[in-house]
């Protein structure tokens, strides 16, 4: 079984209120609210003010975790391992791990500190979309690398440039993903191995910085209609998008 950790940002309703939090995808498919689970763990250990301590150690924000550096990411991984054990016992409550159907997944990092291409060209960090977004140009799918405090790499996600911003996948994998990147537009399909991007000399990153790796070079796709569904997938994530109303040239460069 893979030891990769998958982190994302989710929103769900709790009565009249809304909860927006960092979640981890468990092996069962449920999503663990790691901040709240850490608070429960600390309370069982007898720590005083466990909610406040959990907010410091395992924040409910991926951006804050990234700003905490290697130690913060390692602490999240410990919390996820605790959640997995709890889930295997069959007693992890829905308040700590809502089912996928009850939540809305956002881009894994909805507001990067910096968003840019590999060549240094800046993109609009406020223009980040996720699943369901309308594409304003020919889809050029690829991966993005996400920065950790201290200049390191926190993980990778599905990504493609869109207008002056980008679309990011719902899940950040803390390990280099394996398998293939698959693009489907209508009935047309294209695929390429993810190892295509291996060996790139990655830049030194700041906490919360997202850098889009060079887009894949897939064979041209045939014509398609406006509004056509665009499905981008890899083994660890899938993005369902739509060809937007402005129209695009029907070729993946």
Image: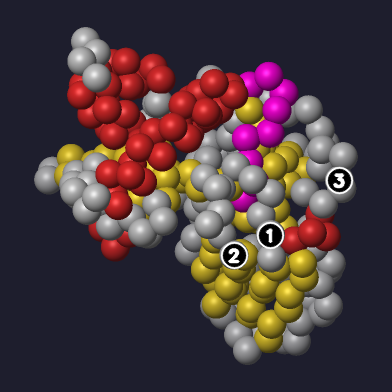
Q: Secondary structure at mark 1?
A: loop
- Give the numbered dot on residue 235: 2
Looking at the image, tell me whether mark 1 or mark 3 is earlier in sequence order. 1
Q: Residue at x 54, y 61 (%)?
A: 237
Magenta-colored stretch includes residue 211? no
Q: Residue furthest left?
A: 15
Marks 1/2 in contact by CB < 8 Å: the verdict is: yes
Q: Secondary structure at mark 2?
A: loop
In the rendered view, how is the structure colored?
Answer: secondary structure
Residue 191 quadrant: bottom right
Provide the residue span drawn in magenta: 149-157
Residue 233 quadrant: bottom right
Q: Nearer the viewer, residue 25 or 185?
A: 25
Looking at the image, tell me whether mark 1 or mark 2 is earlier in sequence order. 1
Residue on which the image places disc 1:
178
Q: Secondary structure at mark 3?
A: loop
Report how far apart the C-alphas of labels 3 and 2 lie in the structure. Answer: 21 Å
Q: Is residue 222 above or below residue 63?
A: below
């Amino acid at each position: 079984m893979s030891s990769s950790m998958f982190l994302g940002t989710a929103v769900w309703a709790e009565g009249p209120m809304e909860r927006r939090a960092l979640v981890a995808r468990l092996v069962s498919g449920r999503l663990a609210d790691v901040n709240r689970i850490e608070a429960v763990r600390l309370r069982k250990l007898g720590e005083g003010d466990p909610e406040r301590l959990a907010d410091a150690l395992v924040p409910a924000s991926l951006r804050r975790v990234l700003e905490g550096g290697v130690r913060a990411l390692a602490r999240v991984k410990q919390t996820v391992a605790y959640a997995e054990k709890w889930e295997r016992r069959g007693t992890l409550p829905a308040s700590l791990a809502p089912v996928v159907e009850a939540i809305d997944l956002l881009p894994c990092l909805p507001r990067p500190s910096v968003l840019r291409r590999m060549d240094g060209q800046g993109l609009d960090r406020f223009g980040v979309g996720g699943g369901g977004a309308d594409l304003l140009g020919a889809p050029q799918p690829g991966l993005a690398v996400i920065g950790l405090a201290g200049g390191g790499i926190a993980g990778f996600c599905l990504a493609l440039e869109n207008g002056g911003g980008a679309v990011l996948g719902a899940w950040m994998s803390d390990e280099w993903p394996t398998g293939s990147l698959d693009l489907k537009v209508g009935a047309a399909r294209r695929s390429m191995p993810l190892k295509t991007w291996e060996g790139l000399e990655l830049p030194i990153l700041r906490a919360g910085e997202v850098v889009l790796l060079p887009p894949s070079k897939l064979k041209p796709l045939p014509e398609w209609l406006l509004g056509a569904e665009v499905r981008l997938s890899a083994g660890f994530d899938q993005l369902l998008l739509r060809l937007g109303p402005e129209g695009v040239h029907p070729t993946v460069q």
